[in-house]
Image (cartoon, grey):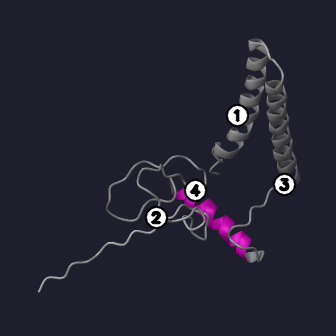
Amino acid sequence: MRTVAKQHTTQVTDEEATTGTGLPSPRQGSGAERRCGWCRRVLPQQGSVGRPRQYCGQACRQRAYEQRSATAKAGLSGDVVLVTRAELDGLQDRLYQLRCALEDVQTLLTERPTKAELERSLADLVRSTGRLDRLWVSERAAG
């Protein structure tokens, strides 16, 4: 007798696509590039055999373990992010700059801007966005 197994497909939301450690879930699509769970460097592609790598090396694995241990000892959940007041202030400043740049572009679009004015305003918007982008995708020091 021959048994036929049916495949079931499920859609996974962004919340479900991460594990309790904040790392990408193994269910993540094969087309997405995987990043180190600590320093955020892009991990090299690997074959289909074995578990997917979560860290680029032993040092990153150790730093992640130390962070998980420290948050557990403090009684915090794994998804808590601790930042210094200076880091939070810097993020809020960058968000304010982005909001101002967006408002400038919106205001300019209601008027009859010259090409130079529009280019300058859009360049400011791109520059503000770039500063925020570097904040999120910059690699963390491994040691």
Mark 1 lies on residue = 130
Residue at image point 58% right, 61% down: 14
Return the residue at label 2. Answer: 26
Label 4 to label 2: alpha-carbon separation: 19 Å
Residue 115, position as x, y percentages in the image: 74, 13
Main secondary-structure element of the magenta-colored stretch: helix
Q: CA distance from mark 3 to mark 4?
A: 21 Å
Q: Is residue 101 above or below residue 10?
A: above
Mark 2 nearby-residue class (10 Å; few <14, some 14–19, many ≥20): some
User: Mark 3 and mark 2 in contact (Cβ < 8 Å)?
Assistant: no
Q: Amino acid at mark 3?
A: Thr
| x and y, in percent, of residue 117 in the image | 80, 16
What residue is rendered at 76% in x and 19% in y? Answer: 118
Position of residue 17 measured from the top left corner of the image (x, y, whole percent) = 54, 64
Check the image and name the residue furthest to the left: 1
Amino acid on which the number 4 mark rests in the picture: Cys
Which mark identifies residue 44? none
* Mark 3 lies on residue: 84
What secondary structure is found at the residue carrying circle 3? loop
Chain-order first, disc 1 or disc 2: 2
| Foreground pick, 14 / 41 | 14
Task: Look at discs 1 and 4 and give the one toward the viewer.
Answer: 1
Check residue 60 in the rendering and tell me which mark sits there, or answer none.
Answer: 4
Whether tag 3 and tag 4 are in contact, CB under 8 A, the answer is no
Give neighbour class at mark 3: few <14, some 14-19, many 20+ (Cα, 10 Å). Answer: few
The image quarter containing residue 18 is: bottom right
What crowding class fits label 4: few (fewer than 14 Cα within 10 Å), some (14-19), or many (20 or more)?
many
Q: Image height check: is 83 above or below 79?
A: above
Magenta-tinted stretch: 58-72
